[in-house]
Image: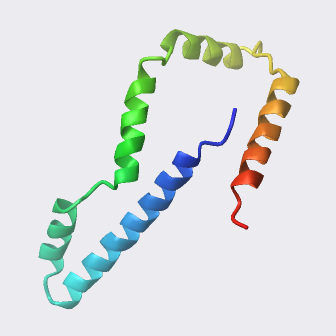
Amino acid sequence: MNVNDALKSAALNTEQTQTQARTTAQGGAAAGNGAAATAATSDSVRLSSTYQALETKGDSKSSSFDAKKVAEIKAAIANGTFQIDPEKVTNGLIDTVKTLISARPA
């Protein structure tokens, strides 16, 4: 279990897109086109290449989604019988930390 760096990139791209949308809307409002600028902003949404790549990866993994297993886990949590393997959690955390340390810029 590792932290997915692609999710971090997607969050960063979402933040950048929101900042660009606010900037565009503010620029249009300053020019006296408040409603028109808002409409233009919502009409000119572009998906980044990173998001498009994530979307493609998500499609390939969606076939491996097991709704029955998710329902079983939810039921086990609800009735208090869900068992957590602390060794598996620990190993996952250690793997994640190793990945984050090796990915840090020098």
Q: Quadrant of residue 91?
A: top right
Image position of 58 (left or right of 94): left
At horizontal 42% and vertical 32% (from top left) the residue drawn is: 58
- Quarter the C terminus occupies: bottom right
Instruction: Report the colour scheme.
Output: rainbow
Image position of 39 (left or right of 6): left
Q: Position of residue 14 (x, y in %)?
A: 42, 59
At horizontal 43% and vertical 60% (from top left) the residue drawn is: 13
Q: Is residue 43 above or below residue 87?
A: below
Q: Quadrant of residue 92?
A: top right
Which residue is most to the front?
A: 106
Image position of 96 (left or right of 14): right
Q: Position of residue 51 (x, y in %)?
A: 38, 49
Depth check: 49 or 18 in front? 49
Q: Position of residue 102 (x, y in %)?
A: 74, 52
- Quarter the N terminus occupies: top right
Q: Is residue 77 above or below residue 102?
A: above
Depth check: 12 or 49 in front? 49
At horizontal 81% and vertical 25% (from top left) the residue drawn is: 88
Question: Number of callouts in the render?
Answer: 0
Q: Quadrant of residue 54?
A: top left
At horizontal 16% and vertical 61% (from top left) the residue drawn is: 43
Q: Position of residue 68 (x, y in %)?
A: 52, 9
Q: Is residue 86 above or below residue 4?
A: above
